[in-house]
Image: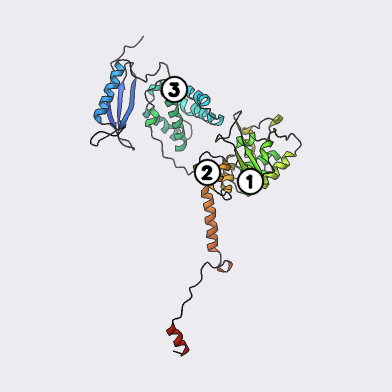
């Protein structure tokens, strides 16, 4: 049985937030749905408020116009009947995969967050019932571990909030959701030092290579640590991209989640190939099976693409055999960054080697060059005096004419 339509009603109120006070409206639509939305930041000055700011009178006028439009059935942003968060999440995942051409690895991360953190909390809820308060309660449950079984960091919770916001923003366009409730939830402060990496020294890398289960695995670990190629880029590497004559490796593709795509930045790059890598790859090319230009450098079974998950597991075993502290496979790329920053002529050159889209990402490695330079300067300062050339000489005192005359006469 259909419920009778109600007369729309509501009120405006002022809310104090860290970024300043703002006017909000809370109103009920004819179909019984309750909506809360931000009108704009509070203006308390004299004269006409700047663009975007709202006085109490303007907030009341906004609500009056909104309720009038609702009464006449002209209110934009009516949610379509039956639209749940699960519907919106499925549409957003389709959108980022097909319309935004999202990379398989990124899409896999999105699906994982939606499946593990968002659908259990909001899946069957109507879109219009999701409020900022509910979102904050959900985020708190992620931090306490109630929702996932273990507490999540602020950084991880912020990433989940960003995905939730993306889903609701897409729902605003597709389903006519009046407002995106995630916009009114401030992100948490992140205690994260982007300059701190886990990485190996060159000696530890060589120990890892010795602990590898096969010659090919050892070559993969060495190439990852001494060229900075990502795991998907290593799996996609072909012999035509290894230039022994110019001591370089061309990176044009990446293989992940069963698909061959461009590198993460969307552009190819050329990386210097140090002698250790060149020698290892030269040996690998003579191992007795196909090494033509179109063949994979690190093939899996039957010459097909290598299984990345199995490679990661063998990497763990090699670490244990070598007696090394555990780090992620991706940290071999950080190993290259922390070593290469000392040899690069500029941060822009290092950015090109690493294939970063933004130079600010590469800037994280400058910390390690500064540390190295500072250590060398400090070592020189503590070196015994007889082992270093003096960087200053005592000032020579000039003898005055009177003193010289006194010395001649024994005075």
Report the residue marked by disc 2: 362
**Percent x, y of residue 364:** 51, 45
Q: Earlier along the polypeptide chain: callout 1 or callout 2?
A: 1
Q: Earlier along the polypeptide chain: callout 3 or callout 2?
A: 3
Q: How is the image coloured?
A: rainbow
Q: Is residue 322 above or below residue 68?
A: below
User: Rounded to the nearest whole Å, what is the CA distance between mark 3 and mark 2?
Assistant: 38 Å
Which of these two is toward me, 293 or 206? 293
Q: Are marks 3 and 2 in contact (CB under 8 Å)?
A: no
Report the residue marked by disc 1: 205
Could you tell whether 26 is left or right of 238 in the image? Answer: left
User: Rounded to the nearest whole Å, what is the CA distance between mark 1 and mark 2?
Assistant: 22 Å
Determine the secondary structure under disc 3. helix
- Number of the label disc, if any, that sits on residue 85: 3
Quadrant hosting residue 44 = top left
Q: Earlier along the polypeptide chain: callout 3 or callout 1?
A: 3
Determine the secondary structure under disc 1. helix
Q: Are marks 1 and 2 in contact (CB under 8 Å)?
A: no
- Number of the label disc, if any, that sits on residue 326: none
Residue under the point 33% across and 12% down: 3
User: Rounded to the nearest whole Å, what is the CA distance between mark 3 and mark 1?
Assistant: 47 Å
Could you tell whether 269 is left or right of 293 in the image? Answer: left
Q: How many other residues sit within 10 Å of disc 1, few (<14), some (14-19) or many (≥20)? A: many
Determine the secondary structure under disc 2. helix
Q: How many other residues sit within 10 Å of disc 2, few (<14), some (14-19) or many (≥20)? A: many
Q: Are marks 3 and 1 in contact (CB under 8 Å)?
A: no
Residue 50 seen in this snapshot:
yes
Could you tell whether 147 is left or right of 14 in the image? Answer: right
Residue under the point 26% across and 31% down: 55
**Percent x, y of residue 156:** 47, 35
């Amino acid at each position: 049985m259909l419920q009778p339509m109600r007369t729309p009603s509501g009120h405006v109120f002022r809310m104090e937030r860290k970024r300043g006070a703002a006017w909000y409206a809370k109103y009920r639509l004819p179909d019984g749905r309750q909506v809360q939305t931000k009108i704009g930041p509070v203006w308390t000055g004299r004269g006409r408020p700047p663009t975007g700011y709202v006085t109490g009178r303007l907030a009341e006028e906004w609500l009056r116009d909104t309720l009038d439009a609702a009464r006449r059935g002209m209110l934009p942003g009516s949610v379509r009947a039956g639209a749940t968060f699960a519907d919106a999440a499925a549409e957003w995942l389709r959108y980022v995969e097909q319309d935004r051409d999202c990379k398989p690895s990124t899409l896999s991360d999105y699906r994982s967050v939606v499946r593990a953190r968002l659908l259990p909390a909001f899946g069957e809820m109507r879109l219009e019932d999701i409020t900022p308060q509910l979102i904050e309660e959900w985020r708190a449950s992620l931090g306490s571990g109630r929702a996932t079984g273990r507490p999540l960091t602020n950084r991880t919770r912020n990433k989940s909030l960003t995905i939730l916001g993306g889903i609701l923003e897409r729902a605003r366009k597709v389903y006519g959701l009046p407002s995106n409730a995630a916009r009114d939830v401030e992100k948490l402060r992140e205690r994260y030092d982007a300059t701190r990496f886990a990485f190996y020294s060159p000696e530890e890398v060589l120990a890892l290579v010795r602990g590898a289960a096969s010659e090919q695995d050892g070559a993969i670990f060495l190439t990852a640590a001494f060229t900075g190629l990502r795991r998907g880029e290593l799996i996609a590497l072909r012999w035509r991209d290894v230039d022994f004559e110019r001591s370089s490796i061309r990176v044009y593709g990446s293989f992940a989640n069963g698909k061959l795509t461009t590198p993460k930045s969307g552009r190819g790059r050329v990386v210097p190939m140090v002698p250790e890598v060149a020698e290892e790859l030269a040996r690998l090319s003579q191992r007795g099976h196909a090494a033509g230009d179109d063949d994979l450098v690190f093939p899996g079974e039957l010459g097909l693409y290598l299984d990345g998950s199995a490679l990661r597991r063998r990497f763990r075993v090699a670490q244990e055999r070598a007696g090394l502290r555990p780090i992620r496979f991706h940290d071999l790329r950080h190993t290259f960054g922390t070593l290469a920053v000392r040899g690069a002529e500029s941060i822009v050159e290092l950015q090109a080697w690493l294939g970063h889209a933004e130079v600010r990402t590469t800037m994280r490695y400058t910390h390690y060059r500064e540390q190295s330079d500072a250590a060398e300067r400090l070592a020189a300062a503590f070196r015994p005096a007889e082992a270093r050339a003096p960087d200053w000489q005592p000032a020579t005192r000039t003898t005055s004419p009177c003193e010289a005359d006194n010395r001649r006469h024994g005075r």
